Amino acid sequence: MNLSKRTRNVLIAATVYVVVVLALRFSGSGIGWWMALAMGAVATPLALWMTWLRRRFNERAMAFGRRHGPYAWPEDRRR
């Protein structure tokens, strides 16, 4: 199924929101629905940002490794 990038992002955000709200609500800590919904609204963008940041760091690390080859660090070159 080919979805546009915007549709895929909306579905991912909605799924993360639902999972966070349900996890908070039924975690056994006694959080009510309104508090779980509010915390989900805060936690969802944070989780999506952390995912984006992790992907960006990994892509930059792979690019660094391709540019510098097997001896990326000066300590390794002296051996």
Image (cartoon, rainbow, N blue to C red):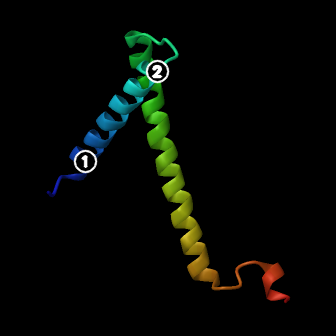
Q: Is residue 15 above or below residue 51?
A: above
Is there a contact, CB below 8 Å, between mark 1 and mark 2? no
The residue lying at 43 percent from left, 32 percent from top is 44
* Quadrant of the snapshot with the C terminus: bottom right
Disc 1 target residue: 8
Tag of residue 53: none
Circle 1: is it few (<14), some (14-19), or many (20+) Cα within 10 Å? few
In this rendering, the label closer to the viewer, 1 or 2: 2
As drawn, is 76 to the left or to the right of 56?
A: right
Residue 14 vertical placement versus 21 (above, below): below
Image quarter where the N terminus lies is bottom left
Q: Earlier in the sequence, mark 1 or mark 2?
A: 1
Side (left or right) of 48 relative to 15: right
Q: Residue at x 79, y 87 (%)?
A: 77
Q: Position of residue 78 (x, y in %)?
A: 85, 88
**Furthest-front residue in view?**
28
What residue type is disc 1 on? Arg
Q: CA distance from mark 1 to mark 2?
A: 23 Å
Helix, strand or loop at label 2? It is helix
Q: Position of residue 66 (x, y in %)?
A: 56, 81
Q: Is residue 4 above or below residue 16?
A: below
Q: Quadrant of residue 68?
A: bottom right
State the residue position of label 2: 39
